[in-house]
Amino acid sequence: MDEKRKKIIFSLWICMLAAILPVKASAESVDISTGNQDFCAQTEAGAGGTISVTGDARDFFSPDTSVITLAVESTAKTASEAVAENGKRAEQVVKAIRVLLSPEKGNSVKTTSFTVRPVYEHDTATKKNILTGYKARHQVAVTTRKVETAGMIIDSGIQNGANEVDGVTFALTELKEYCEGLFKKAADKAQREATFVARALGARISGIKSISPSCGAEAPRPFYRQALMAAEAASSRETGIESGDIGVNASVSVVFYIEKE
């Protein structure tokens, strides 16, 4: 590798680090965008112009976090009765699930919503809606770093009073670590493509004007091997959940300076 190419690759990585370091990654995605960086510009006298390329990279990783959302719904003649009954069942569900969660950081069970509403039935004779009772609903979200226990948590929740499963999602909490590896692949690809195109035009890469990296993940939809019904969950079979892998996509858009060889 000649000295000029080494300098260009070194400059590309300096710009990449400057763009990435100030950003704090979230559990869901990393979205990094920078405009033209003065410190990345290497303008040369008689420069022949610029060339813009985008390198991308993709890989799949196993999720390290699962969020299971359960709900307890109760109906009674009065609002106070519905709330009391719902409270007892919800407390039992939470207590049972906490036994399954290890004390390590990132595991939790918390209430995400609580509602009480009247229930009406339409009387065809009088053509009026008649109040028949009240419905209380308590929703909880369970976060666990042991994704393989998602089915066990669902079963325990239903066996102890939950009668709704509102969803199961998976995520990568350390997404930035995965993105850093993909950024290198994407940056190398952008460098190769720019060099190839420049040579085809009788030119060579002489510097970097700007760089814009981005990275994000798409979580797969969980697959239920068995229906999440209370009757089945109460059986000896464990509810099967397939987490699948999470695809992570990274791209690096670079504007290079070029000059005639």
Image (cartoon, rainbow, N blue to C red):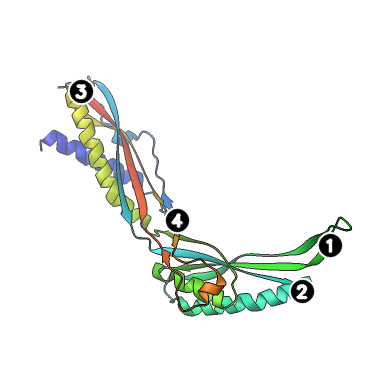
Of badges 4 and 2, the one in the foreground is 4
Q: What residue is pinned by disc 3?
A: 259
Drawn side of residue 218 relative to residue 16, left or right: right
Q: Between tags 2 and 3, which lies in front?
A: 2
Q: Amino acid at mark 2?
A: Ser
Q: Looking at the image, do the residues carrying marks 4 and 3 touch, with CB atoms under 8 Å apart?
A: no
Look at mark 4 in the image and give the residue it sits on: 221
Mark 1 element type = strand
Whole-number angstrom distance, CA of label 4 to CA of label 3: 49 Å
Mark 4 belongs to which amino acid? Answer: Arg
Closer to the chain start, of discs 4 and 3, is: 4
Q: Which residue is mark 2?
A: 80
Mark 2, Cα crowd under 10 Å, few <14 / some 14-19 / many 20+, is few
Label 1 to label 2: alpha-carbon separation: 19 Å
Evaluate whether residue 134 shows in this view. Answer: yes
Q: Earlier in the sequence, mark 4 or mark 1?
A: 1
Quadrant in the picture for the C terminus: top left
Cα distance in 3D space between marks 4 and 1: 40 Å
Element at label 2: helix
